[in-house]
Amino acid sequence: MEHQELLAGLIRLHVLHHAAEHEIYGQWMIDGLAHHGYRLSPGTLYPMLHSLERKGYLVSREERKGSSRRKLYRATDKGREGLAVAKRQLREFTGEAMQDNIEKE
């Protein structure tokens, strides 16, 4: 994906947003992000999920069904708090960026 480094923060926010609403798993998140135009491979998403978990933003549990297993993630209190802070900053940025566009027109 072009501009991956810049968009990585937005991808993390998408992950936290959904993990704050309900448990998520990797493939579901990959499919969901694809609807927003992000094309992530498991090799990109899973290290991101593991990093968010190591930093305390997510917690996981393993679910087994027969011979298959799935790791489910949900946001921690720290994850929900971080998401709230990021949303405030994002609102401020979008307001500023949109104002710049209006002034230039």
Image: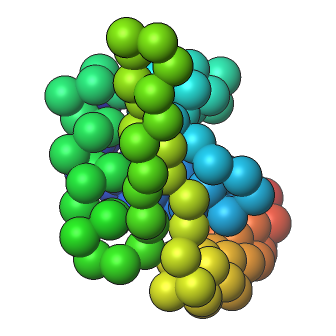
Residue at screen point 51% across, 19% down: 65
Which quarter of the picture shows residue 97? bottom right
User: Where, quadrant-wise, is the N terminus in this rendering?
Assistant: top left
Q: Is residue 71 positioned above or below 60 on the image?
A: above
Which of 17/19 is in front?
A: 19
In the image, residue 23 above or below residue 96 = above
Name the spot of residue 47 as percent of width and height, x first.
20, 45
Horizontal and vertical percent for residue 31? 56, 20
How is the rendered protein coloured? Answer: rainbow
What number of labels is visible? 0
Q: Is residue 14 visible?
A: no
Residue 97 to residue 81: above or below: above
Q: Nearer the viewer, residue 88 or 71?
A: 71
* Vertical comparison of 33 with 75: above or below: above
Drawn side of residue 80 relative to residue 50, left or right:
right
Q: 10 left or right of 42?
A: right
Nearest the viewer among 91 and 72 is 72
Tell me if residue 81 can be seen.
yes
Name the residue: 66% across, 83% down: 84
- The quadrant in which the C terminus is found is bottom right
Report the residue at 75% width, 58% height from top. Answer: 21
Specify the farthest residue to the top: 67
Residue 16 x, y percent position in the rendering: 56, 61
Residue placed most toward the observer, 4 or 59: 59
